[in-house]
Amino acid sequence: MSFNPADLGYLVPYLILAVTGMLLVLAEAFYKGKDRSALVTLTVAGAIAAGVASVVLYRQVGDQRVAVLGEMLLADKTSYVLSALFCVLTAFTALMSPAHQKEHDWQMGEYYGVMLLSASGMVMLAHAANLVTIFLGIETMSIGVYVMCAMRRRSRRGNEAAMKYFLIGAFATGFLMYGMALLYGAAGTSSLVGMQTALAQTTNPGLVIAGSFLLVVAFGFKIAAVPFHMWAPDAYEGAPTPVTAFMAAAVKAAAVAAMIRVFGIALGGEIMPFGSLGWASPMVVIAAVTITIGNISAVRQNNIKRMLAYSSISHGGVLMVGVCALGLGSMAANGAIVYYLIAYSFTTMGAFAIVSFVGSKGRERLLVDDWAGLGSQHPAIALAMTVLLLSFGGVPPTGGFFAKFYIFKSAMEVYDGQLIWLVLVGVVNSAISIYYYLRIVTAMYFKDANQPFAPTRSGGLLFVIAFCPLLILELGLMPGWWLKLVG
């Protein structure tokens, strides 16, 4: 593989995040004093600069698909839209964090450097065109998040969350590597583009079946699909709330970005996904079980972070429906998945920003009843949360409604109606989910507060809380423009 310096131009977003992250880690080593506002500013500036670079390169690349660094990476519309999404989510997490750090006494400057390095792994996944870059991207992203979960060192729950996430993540890495090794053995190449043709003609179909099934399991762990979801509720509850937002929004979106590449390119086509031994057969069952179990478990939760964790599990199942549709040949699935990721990510980021706002050091207010009276004491915050919860439930005219609509529509386009039963499962569960989302709305508006709220305030946190519901409404009112981003 020859190195072409011009290829670095396509990787400017990744380079900005990686270099800024390393600078932040070094800056913390020499930083004196408790005020870390300069580090926050540099983090947000780096993430926004990388996002702007993604937009510029998106416009330059047009409808091309450019192979970069010897076909290790791909530069196309999908990669740059997802890169911009990861950059904005990283900036929002950085804006949310200072108030929570100060309130709960875990002010650590290296947190911001680790966050940007983790985001650089996400960008690598968005551009991945090789099994090697898939693995490097996942590990770069995951190791950073393991560290971020344990940043609140005095919290036993935080330490437990980090340990569970780390152990399950290491377990998933084993499945990922073994699956990749088997597919490489069957194809003779690690290139995702070359793998599709090579696997279809392989003389070792057993390796293809075993390798693809192992990858289904590995990615099932990464997006917390049932039955690989055990870590998610505890990790989401124990991690600091801004880190939980980053995990639930950015990390899940990055894992799905990797699935788009693996199952849409390498394992897509007219052979690998089909039949009882095709990877789509176990994935559709896992998707149906994930959507159902996630919703049923969420109904039983009184802790809001755990409720949102099970909600996130259910949404992961819906995204798996889109991945199945993509692999089975739906032309609209790629755009539908990207639209869903945008709507879901900002809904999740806004919801956890409000959870962070409502709680304080003395009382985090994580139970549903703790939110009683929020509508009368902080009506704007309650209204923002209501919009976000309705988006989670798929109620029009929010972005969440059209996100589910386009995913299910793409699934119905699959040949011979193979996924119609899965669409019905998704629609029924969307109706069920409205119940537990409205429990929070009922508490905010129809119950009296036990004591006045003492919210955690900051300009950055309020900006995120204001921006996310407005974007979700815009996504619902003007979905066509967003769908055309990768169309």
Image (cartoon, grey):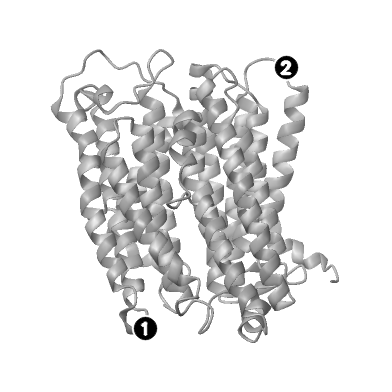
The residue where tag 1 is placed is 415
**What is the quadrant of the N terminus in the image?**
bottom right
Residue at the extreme left:
446
The reply, left or right, for residue 62 in relation to residue 429 is right
Q: Position of residue 320 (x, y in %)?
A: 43, 62
For the question of whether residue 65 can be seen, the reply is no
Q: Is residue 60 above or below residue 242?
A: below
Disc number lying in front (2 or 1): 1
**Amino acid beneath label 2:** Lys
Q: How many marks?
A: 2
Q: Secondary structure at mark 1?
A: helix
Q: Secondary structure at mark 2?
A: loop
Q: Position of residue 258 (x, y in %)?
A: 57, 61
Q: Earlier in the sequence, mark 2 or mark 1?
A: 2
For the question of whether residue 297 can be seen, the reply is yes
Q: Is residue 256 above or below residue 330?
A: above
**Amino acid beneath label 1:** Tyr
Taking depth in this image into account, of 459 and 158 the one nearest to the observer is 158
Q: Is residue 323 above or below residue 471?
A: below
Residue at the extreme front:
206
Q: Quadrant of residue 322?
A: bottom left
Taking depth in this image into account, of 424 and 11 the one nearest to the observer is 424
Q: Position of residue 374 (x, y in %)?
A: 24, 25
The residue where tag 2 is placed is 32
Q: Is residue 154 above or below residue 45?
A: above
Disc 2 to disc 1, C-alpha distance:
62 Å
